[in-house]
């Protein structure tokens, strides 16, 4: 059974393949359909953006399509950068620098934050399913670790004593916001009538 990952972001493709691959799906990506323009993320919420992308690709490719939108919410910044996390600054390094600059002088107890991921599945006939995953942590005072991507080097997990970028990939893929959203999406598919999970995954 084909499942289209509605993204051309190589980091997301690798992470989602680890989360969903090996279970009977034939995973496709937006890269398998060259010539289609990027889908504009014009929504005001994670859910709106995820649905925009999933619906557009389901219509284009005629396949069940999975899209996500995610962001970092920092309490001391009133929830910013949130849905605009990827547009907070031009590059990942600049986004981290800007975030640390904005939090300069903010004590550890007030640096609480969370990663949020909303995943949307869309079928060519218009049916959709949406699920949300959250991972709580706080913003470190400096970057640490070389794994992951995005804000992972400054997202500190107190229970591990490490940033997300310092975690082994298999552990990140167990506890991350994207992992939790994917687990919820898979559960929704298993509970569908009829189940929309390949037989090997039942």
Image (cartoon, rainbow, N blue to C red):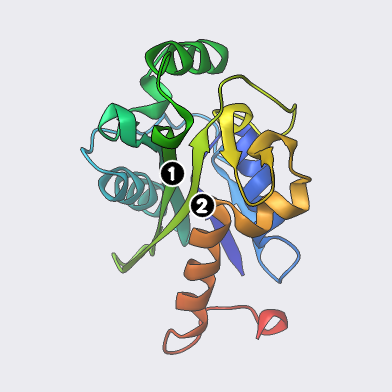
Q: Is residue 113 left or right of residue 16?
A: left
Q: Is residue 152 left or right of residue 90?
A: right
Residue 77 percent across, percent down from the top left: 30, 27
Q: Is residue 84 left or right of residue 149?
A: left
How packed mark 1 is, by other alpha carbons closer than 10 Å (few <14, some 14-19, many 20 or more), is many
Residue 128 percent across, percent down from the top left: 32, 66
Residue position marked by numbered label 1 in the rendering: 114
Measuring 67% from the left and 54% from the top, which residue is drawn there?
173
Q: Within the image, what quadrant is residue 123 found in?
A: bottom left
SS at mark 1? strand
Measuring 36% from the left and 44% from the top, which residue is drawn there?
53
- Can residue 83 be seen here? The reply is no
Measuring 46% from the left and 89% from the top, which residue is drawn there?
194
Q: Nearer the viewer, residue 32 or 90?
A: 90
Q: Nearer the viewer, residue 82 or 26?
A: 82
In the rendered image, the quadrant that contains the C terminus is: bottom right
The number of numbered badges drawn on the structure is 2
SS at mark 2? helix
Q: Are marks 1 and 2 in contact (CB under 8 Å)?
A: yes
Residue 68 percent across, percent down from the top left: 44, 48
How packed mark 2 is, by other alpha carbons closer than 10 Å (few <14, some 14-19, many 20 or more), is many
Residue position marked by numbered label 2 in the rendering: 177
């Amino acid at each position: 059974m084909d499942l289209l990952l509605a993204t051309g972001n190589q980091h997301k493709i690798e992470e989602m393949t680890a989360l969903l691959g090996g279970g009977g799906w034939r995973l496709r990506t937006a890269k398998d359909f060259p010539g289609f323009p990027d889908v504009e993320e014009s929504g005001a919420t994670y859910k709106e953006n995820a649905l925009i992308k999933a619906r557009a690709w389901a219509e284009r490719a005629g396949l069940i399509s999975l899209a996500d939108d995610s962001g970092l919410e920092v309490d001391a910044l009133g929830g910013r950068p949130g849905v605009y996390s990827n547009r907070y600054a031009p590059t990942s390094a600049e986004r981290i620098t800007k975030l640390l600059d904005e939090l300069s002088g903010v004590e550890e107890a007030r640096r609480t934050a969370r990663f949020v991921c909303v995943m949307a599945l869309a079928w060519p006939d218009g049916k959709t399913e949406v699920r949300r995953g959250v991972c709580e942590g706080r913003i470190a005072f400096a970057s640490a670790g070389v794994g992951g991507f995005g804000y992972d080097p400054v997202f500190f997990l107190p229970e591990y004593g490490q940033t997300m970028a310092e975690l082994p990939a298999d552990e990140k893929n167990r506890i991350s916001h994207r992992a939790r959203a994917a687990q919820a999406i898979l559960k929704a598919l298993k509970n569908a009538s009829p189940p929309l999970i390949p037989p090997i995954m039942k």
